[in-house]
Image (tube, helix red, strand yellow):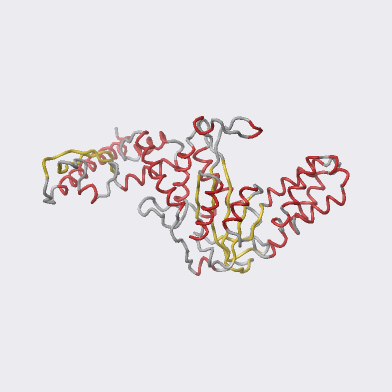
Amino acid sequence: ALQRFDEDLVKAVSKDMSTYIGEVMSSISFRANTPGVNGTRTKQVFTRFGWCEVRHPYRVGNPEESDVFKAFGIERKMTQSALKVATMLSVTQGSFKEAKETLSMLGCGNLSVSKLRKETLHVGEEVLSRLRTPEKDIRQYPDTKLRTPEGSHRVPRTLVIMADGTNPPCTKADTSGIKGKNSAQAKSRQLRVTSACEYVNVTDKGVPIPIAGSFSYAVTDLGIGELTSLIHEHAVSRGSGTAPRVQCVADGEEALEKAMRDALPFAEFTNDFMHASSYLNTCCEKLGIDNALKEYKTCRSIMLRHGAGSVVDRIRRLYPDKLEASKEAYDALKYLDKRRNNMRYGWLRKNGYYISSCHIEAAARILVARRCKQAGMHWRHHNAACVCAIIAKLICRKRPLLSGLFFSPAVPDGEI
């Protein structure tokens, strides 16, 4: 019994506190001498200490309304504080069931999985709506965050917008009739993720150093047209109209590039260096030459110092017959040639721009994969977007757009 002392104490305290909260709310509910009271009703309310019973005046014609619930911010039978904890656990734990068990273990009472899921998706709908029409989010930083570290130099303030897509597994209701890879039946649907950050310093090797606390994220489950609008609104809210420089970074997907160019036509657009290296590797392997790996390393070094254009010209000059004989090598080189203006990596590094989409790829894993792509999971497409939208707001250091909805997370920007 003594070994379970603190565990039993938590249960006892939670039970007493839930009773106390119910008595306080009940007492306050009858202090207002509002006319039209016809009796007393009792309502269950979920608080930080579990369920409690609140007695409130009953009015004919509007039996569920009571001023005390509005005063305490109770919506759908939950206090705001309880909703914060329940929502955070729902999106950070492995499943709604794990969130339910953790909630109970913390002494917050028993909340059913169905109620937990319903409330989380309700909050997600609100957050998703706010992400599509964001409020002004131009950030000011103290001098300590803008100080130029040793071994780096200053560049004009640059706003970087990145975008990527990732596919959580979805139910048949959302994948039926939709073709996936190789024209097979799709088993997942795509969510689009965007991020924004700012920097004023780059290392001596040309690598930007994001300002701590400058990251923000958005998620959408709608089509590419919606993504264009989302990127535009996200960038405008972060001050793209006043930023000295704006850069867009993404992989080589044509639809994604078009969406970003339509949203921010004045921005410097860049294709990710690692994606370009992947196509370069394919080209070198399919040429059928003996020293394919050595050639790839040489070409990759050239591409990093100068750009994809120099590599394309080199391979065409050295291996014209090999390219003509291999369609795979020709197509891979064509991919690089078509995007050579987006792959001027030497110029980009010299001028202090990003050449990698590492931040958005890491964000996609944290926002979507970690919660929605676990073994055995199958989501409704829109529900997955709601959950990921909540996570997108949780990992931002800035105060959430829905005030009072989330805790301030302790996730360092360096982890994203």
Q: Which of 176 and 383 is in front in this view?
A: 176
Foreground pick, 342 / 201: 342
Horizontal arrangement in the rendering, residue 324 relative to residue 84 (left or right): right
Where is residue 338 drawn, in percent x and y?
73, 51
The quarter of the picture where residue 159 lies is: bottom right
Q: Position of residue 368 (x, y in %)?
A: 52, 42
Q: In this view, does 12 lie to the left or right of 340?
A: left
Q: Is there any visible trace of residue 377 in the rendered image?
A: no
Residue 206 lies, in percent from the top left, at 67, 62
Residue drawn at x 52%, y 49% as measured from the top left: 226
Residue at the (41%, 33%) spot, across then down: 97
405 vs 39, left or right, is right
Which quadrant would the N terminus be assigned to in this image? top left
- In terms of depth relative to the viewer, which is nearer, 7 or 260? 260
Which residue is pictured at 73% across the width and 60% down the height? Answer: 346
The x, y position of residue 83, in whole percent, is: 34, 45
Count all numbered tags in the image, as a single digit: 0
For residue 177, which quarter of the picture? top right
